[in-house]
Structure formats: structure tokens, C-alpha cells
């Protein structure tokens, strides 16, 4: 049975919005720099605004970073509109402008480093796995560099 929430308003934790983990929030805020995707996409507005994170699939338990977008309060209101007279922002358009904003801020490209520490007896296994990954990524035309250093 779900426990009552801390607010004591009769709602249970099962009803409550699931907290977005801090590392996801941090990464998303770093990508958007607190610029609202819709203000950016529709008006080229790159001003920093007070905002909220919107769940694009409207499922508050889905905290995957691809399901979230930073919207200013006004745009979040339009996104959440339930009106048959005014067309609310759609998940597809928010996603489109969000991705444009991320590209604008240069976060569409990532670089990551894989560090493998293994003893020499496992070297051949590790080397084979890394070579296969390397070759697969090169075939997909990705920019891959491979460096190997003995640990002394
Ligand atoms: Zn906005």
C-alpha cells in the first residue's frame, strides 16, 4: 500500500511526481543553460528564464533525459493546456526545438573516454574487445581515437 506523502494532503507517494535524479537535472540544465526550448525555437530568444522540467511523454515517472525539456513557466503552461480551442505545444515540437537548442549550445556532440585497467594476463581479451569496438565505430564513420599506455 502506498505511503501518504510528506505534505499530508491525503495524496500518496504513488500519486506524487517522481523526483528527477540530480545528475540528470544537472546535465539537462548544463545543456539548455536555462534557456527555454520553445522561446528559443519560436522566437530565437536565448534569455535565461525561470523554468520547469517538462516530461515530454507526459509520464511523470519517466525521468530519462531524452524525455525531459526545460520550459519557462509560460511555455510550460501552454504545453500543459487542455483546451479544445487553443492548440497546446506538442511533445514533438518541444523535442525538435530542444534538440536545436542543444545543438546551438554545442552539446549535441559528446566525447567520452574508456579507461580499462587490466593485468597483462588479461591484455589480449581486453585488446580484442577494444579493437572490435574501435573497428565498429570507425565503420560507422565516427571519430574515434585509441590510446594505450602501459601503467608501468
Ligand atoms: Zn518559453
Image (tube, rainbow, N blue to C red):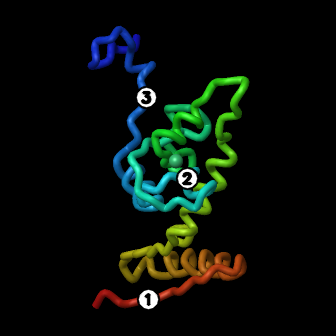
Q: Nearer the viewer, residue 128 or 144?
A: 144
**Which residue is located at x 39 percent, y 83 percent?**
120
The image quadrant where one finds the C terminus is bottom left
Under circle 3, the secondary element is loop
With respect to residue 48, does 52 lie above or below?
Answer: above
Q: Nearer the viewer, residue 58 or 33?
A: 33
Q: Earlier in the sequence, mark 1 or mark 3?
A: 3
Residue indicated by mark 1: 148
Q: Are marks 3 and 2 in contact (CB under 8 Å)?
A: no
With respect to residue 42, does 10 lie above or below?
Answer: above
Q: Nearer the viewer, mark 1 or mark 2?
A: 2
The image quadrant where one finds the N terminus is top left
Q: Nearer the viewer, residue 82 or 45?
A: 45
Q: Nearer the viewer, mark 3 or mark 2?
A: 2
Residue indicated by mark 2: 39
Q: Earlier in the sequence, mark 3 or mark 2?
A: 3
**Which residue is located at x 32 percent, y 18 percent?**
5
**Which residue is located at x 50 percent, y 32 percent?**
60
Give the Cα separation between the discs numbered 3 and 2: 25 Å
Amino acid at each position: 500500500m502506498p505511503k501518504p506523502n510528506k505534505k499530508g494532503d491525503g495524496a500518496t507517494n504513488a500519486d506524487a511526481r517522481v523526483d528527477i535524479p540530480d545528475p540528470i537535472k544537472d546535465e539537462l540544465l548544463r545543456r539548455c543553460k536555462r534557456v527555454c526550448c520553445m522561446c528559443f525555437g519560436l522566437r530565437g530568444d536565448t534569455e535565461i528564464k525561470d523554468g520547469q522540467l517538462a516530461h515530454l511523454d507526459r509520464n511523470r515517472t519517466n525521468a530519462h533525459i531524452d524525455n525531459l525539456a526545460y520550459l519557462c513557466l509560460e511555455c510550460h503552461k501552454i504545453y500543459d493546456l487542455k483546451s479544445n480551442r487553443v492548440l497546446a505545444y506538442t511533445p514533438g515540437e518541444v523535442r525538435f526545438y530542444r534538440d536545436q537548442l542543444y545543438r546551438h549550445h554545442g552539446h549535441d556532440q559528446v566525447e567520452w573516454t574508456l579507461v580499462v585497467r587490466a593485468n597483462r594476463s588479461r591484455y589480449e581479451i581486453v585488446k580484442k574487445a577494444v579493437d572490435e569496438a574501435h573497428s565498429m565505430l570507425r565503420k560507422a564513420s565516427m571519430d574515434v581515437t585509441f590510446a594505450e599506455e602501459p601503467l608501468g
